[in-house]
Amino acid sequence: MSFKSEIYNGEPIILTGKEKTCKRPQGMRSGLEQRNFKQDPFGGFAKGFDMPIIPRDEWGERIEEIEKTKSRLSDLSYQANLRCQDQNGTNYCWANAPVYCVQILRLASGLGVEYLSPASVAAPMKGYKNKGGYGTQALKYIAENGIVPTKHWPCNAISKKYYTEENLESAKNYIVTEWYDLAAENFEQLMTCMLLRIPTVVGYYWWRHQVSAIDPISLGDEKYGIRIRNSWGMNYGKDGYAILGEKIATPDDAVAPRVAISYPNSP
Amino acid sequence: MAIILLALLFSANLNSDAPPISVDKYTVVIIEETETRHHLPKSQLSAINSSVWRDYVKENNGQWRVLDQHADTSEDYDWVKQSLEVKRNGLPWLIFANKERGGSMPLPENLELLMSEIKQ
């Protein structure tokens, strides 16, 4: 009998994309735009994924090991009480997902919980308009400019008044220095990142939404999926978590930040 | 057999030697290369990422880092910078220390062995 992952109490499993848990909260518009491959070709600004794929016949055994040793990224997140993002009416899911991935990378490195502002990434990129984008675009900005902590730039504040010299300087401590660009529609690459505990920013055109992929999941009978953390607040799913089955978990846009600047929490 | 025993004793002594980094509290550091994580045995990868040893360090009012060997630590604490300068023979690498003593060695192959090293 194949291993079946622990599902958190109340955590939804989304297999078709038609489930109620996929419905956008009231007032929330779609935020993911199709990636512009002319502007951001695969492997362009980010290194193309070049690791060997972990074979499917190892997945079940590896996931069992990960859960047994409490080495899921969600274990670290629960351990530190890291809250999920809440884009709260903005169209900035595409910036919330990479910002969450940076927060969890820092947490896994021992830098603690520092909440960072998705609006500090998305708003300057979009001329302070509440507009859509895609994760690769946001990560590119983060790699060049970093992210301002929410104590200096509130997470959903679309306002130029926060674009100050001091804030731009503080953002530089949260630059991502190494990352992978994953091929579109490639579940094997995504699963390899999950098994190696590399958080991944995943965009889904069926959902017109971008989220953070966190853990690999075995659904039993050789069926697999991923645990995502959404940016619709802690009341979504189980503390922001949900499971996506393979069919709909295969991303259209995916980037995986691996290394961020080792900078202790700001005072 | 005698040589093996001597080697074990010697390595045990090394582990309880002077702290490899200068710290004022219990500290655990793992240095790795994230780009080659796929080469690691799954049990060692789990050891790196486990919340179990992090919990232990936290319970002992300690501090910790898991660092990529190329991470920019220029703005981090001195003990973090020192960790990257400790001589090592490969990766992943484990460093643990308190004020009086510590160890520096290849990262054990699984979580159980890692726990037994850092609990010393």
Image (cartoon, helix red, strand yellow):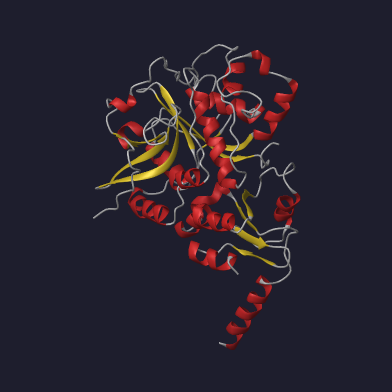
Taking depth in this image into account, of A204 and A239 the one nearest to the observer is A239
In the picture as drawn, the residue positioned furthest to the bottom comes out as B2
Tell me the residue at 60%/43% (across/down). Answer: A112
Q: In this view, does A165 lie above or below A256?
A: above
Tell me the residue at 48%/23% (across/down). Answer: A93
In the visual, does B75 lie left or right of B116? right
Quarter of the image with the N terminus of chain A in it: bottom left
Taking depth in this image into account, of A68 and B6 the one nearest to the observer is A68
Residue A14 location, x and y as percent? 30, 33
Occupied quadrant, residue A32: top left
**Number of marks drawn:** 0
Quarter of the image with the C terminus of chain A in it: top right
Residue A87 location, x and y as percent? 49, 23
Residue A108 location, x and y as percent? 55, 46
In the visual, does A209 lie left or right of B60? left
- Residue B107, visible in the rendered structure: yes
Taking depth in this image into account, of A20 and A258 the one nearest to the observer is A20
- Residue A189, visible in the rendered structure: no
Residue B102 location, x and y as percent? 68, 66
In the visual, does B94 lie left or right of B76? left
Occupied quadrant, residue B28: bottom right
Q: In this view, does B45 lie above or below B118?
A: above
